[in-house]
Amino acid sequence: MIFVYIIAIIIAIPLIGAALLSKQFTIEESITINKPKQDIFDYLKILKHSENFNKWVMTDPNLKKNFSGTDGTVGFVYSWESEMKNVGQGEQEIIGITEGERIDYQIRFIKPFEGVSTSSLFTSAVTDQQTKVAWTFSGDRNYFMCLFHFLFNLKKMLGKDLQTSLVNLKNVLEK
């Protein structure tokens, strides 16, 4: 009988933990790059450049990509489709640009799950030759996604992926 209680508690902990998580989440990572702010911003504004540093885009060399609109402007859409489950299918749209300061995106996931999130890249000068780049990823999550976040510490996993992408960006821009 004690064994049944122990199993029930083990099952209940993540279920209760997920129920207590906020329905909204935000992940932020940052890095300092040894380049002037405007140079970095001009590079980041072109969404196709993400192929050179974004961990998720770089995961599948056979990624099918489609572009619509004028890259570097509001309304540009980068869509992708992959046979790899961890890459999936979706699209990313530039929804706002504050010149020299930030770029805002809406990311619409289609596969392996449906969802909408927002992401932003911020640039701020540290010195004339150094720039801090911050990358945020945020969204809403239903109970299932809360459970997934709780069980797999998705905030930590996504934060690690953002940081990997930022290190890739630093390496590309400091060459």
Image (tube, rainbow, N blue to C red):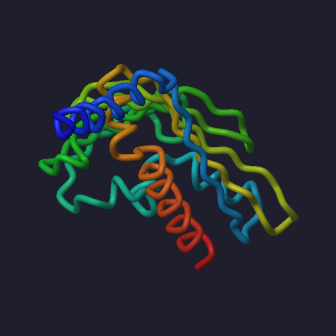
Query: In the orientation shown, which residue stands out farthest toward the right?
Result: 127
Query: In the orientation shown, which residue stands out farthest toward the bottom?
Result: 175
Q: Total of numbered circles in the picture?
A: 0
175 vs 141, nearest the viewer: 141
Residue, x 59% and y 55% (percent of image)?
Answer: 43
13 vs 70, nearest the viewer: 13
Residue, x 30% and y 29% (percent of image)?
Answer: 12
Is 78 displayed left or right of 104 in the figure? left
Is 140 displayed left or right of 115 in the figure? right
The x and y percentages for residue 67 are 33, 39
Residue, x 70% and y 33% (percent of image)?
Answer: 98
Give the vertical position of 20 relative to 161 (above or below): above
Q: Quadrant of the N terminus?
A: top left
The x and y percentages for residue 82 are 18, 47
Give the vertical position of 165 relative to 112 (above or below): below
Query: In the orientation shown, which residue stands out farthest toward the left?
Result: 83
Q: Quadrant of the C terminus?
A: bottom right
The x and y percentages for residue 21 are 48, 27
The image quadrant of residue 111 is: top left
The x and y percentages for residue 61 are 22, 62
Residue, x 64% and y 52% (percent of image)?
Answer: 42
